[in-house]
Image (spheres, rainbow, N blue to C red):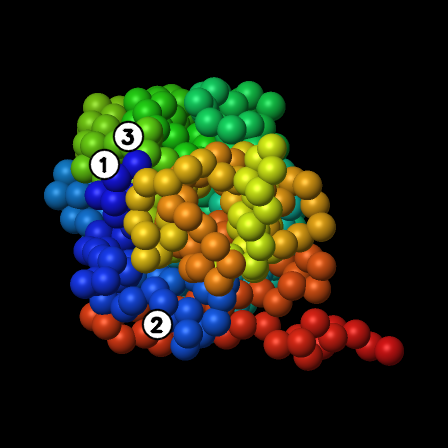
Amino acid sequence: MSGEDVLDLFPPGTHTDGDGTLVVGGCRLDDLADDFGTPVLVVDEVALRRRAREYLHEFRTRRPCADVAFASKSFPCTAIQRLMTEEGLHLDVAGGGEIITALAAGADAARLVLHGNAKTDEELELAVREGVGLVVVDNFDDIDRLERIVPPGHTQPCLVRVIPGVDAATHASVATGHTGSKFGLMPDDARAAITRIERSGVLRCDGLHTHVGSQLLNVEQLAAAVAPLAALGTFDVYDLGGGLGVRYTYDEKPPSVADYAEAMAAAADALLPKDSRIIVEPGRSMVATSACTVYRVTTVKRGERTHVAVDGGMGDNLEVSLYGQRFEATVINRVGGGAHVDLVGRHCESGDQLIDGVALQDPTVGDLVAVPVTGAYCYTMSNQYNGARRIPVVFADGGSARLVVRRDTWDDLLARDVT
């Protein structure tokens, strides 16, 4: 692929400096590698803020009462949650840990939406105590717990999660709206849950929630989830979830945010009450394209296949091993072109393959390699496999860079030991 093709996968505004080195957020990637070490996850802060504003603009232009709730699970970093809060977004939180980081980020608890198919008493107690705005009821056990936990005289607003029966054209690991999903209730059970909530005395059903899946490249599949909600009746709130896909590879052509907003607003206008509030929960499509990961080549092994090994891998990008997500890459100062090699990680697993058959120009030991579109779920699933230290997160903006998450230290690997 040409250099221009490669640049298209990096955050908007990415370019090459006079000597051909990639510049993201106004910062040369070799300078960031020198300053913060490798691997390092680099976020273009301006690109991310623009994406948040784009989401709000596209949805509120079409549906003024729409809200956008960032799906924190896609990048549950306090600095990211703070940025989203500053841009006027609500936060979707999946569990107690994301409530804690959201509050630390300065988010208003009333603007949080709590999800989870297996919420614990501890998490629900935290949500009620802190005043979380909406708790998504995923099952009847949620209702049992909330009825015990919510104190008399207090009312907890809820949404009931509905399985829409939409078979998403995506990897099975990220499909959630099909019959048999572990998330949510089938329509008949959802009706029963709504009735129980209305009779509880301490809960209030403000509306419904649904989610089809993740990395969907067809907006019609996302919009198809609206009709099953409409069939359940009239409510104040309809949370339509997220799921819009992004461009990871040269061949993919995902819909734009405008395309997504148009499809969802059209379905809402046709099927839902005119004055109802809709919520969408973008995660992957909000953060994925705003970031890249920079690695250093440690080994080049030539043979039947050329293996280019770097100093990271499944410890900082588990998406490949977990559900086969394809990425692209480039040497940062020789952008585009080159022979096809296998970019592999440092972990003791044959499955630690970052990218099979990726074009790299003459990779050698010591080169820096950048993998774009790593803003979603890479930080989320980072781990310490083989004693690896979790990597830092750096915000780049206008040529300045700041550390928002430090690299693990060796002491961090021992921090939880009690003997």
- Image quarter in which the N terminus is found: top left
Residue on which disc 2 sits = 31
**Identity of the residue drawn at 29% across and 32% down:** 254
Label 3 crowd (10 A; few <14 / some 14-19 / many >=20): few
Residue 247: x percent and y percent? 33, 37
Residue on which disc 3 sits = 253
Q: Disc 3 or 2, which lies upstream in sequence?
A: 2
- Image quadrant where residue 222 sits: top left
**Identity of the residue drawn at 58% across and 54% down:** 299
Q: Amino acid at mark 3?
A: Lys
For this orientation, the residue located farthest to the right is 419
**Identity of the residue drawn at 41% across and 77% down:** 35
Q: Amino acid at mark 2?
A: Asp
**Relative height, residue 183 to residue 315 (above, below):** above
Residue on which disc 1 sits = 256
**Identity of the residue drawn at 68% across and 41% down:** 350
**Marks 3 and 2, how far apart in space?**
32 Å
**Marks 3 and 1, how far apart in space?**
9 Å
Q: Which mark is residue 203?
A: none
Residue 268: x percent and y percent? 25, 30
Q: Disc 1 or 2, which lies upstream in sequence?
A: 2
Label 2 crowd (10 A; few <14 / some 14-19 / many >=20): few
Asked whether the viewer can see residue 264, the reply is no
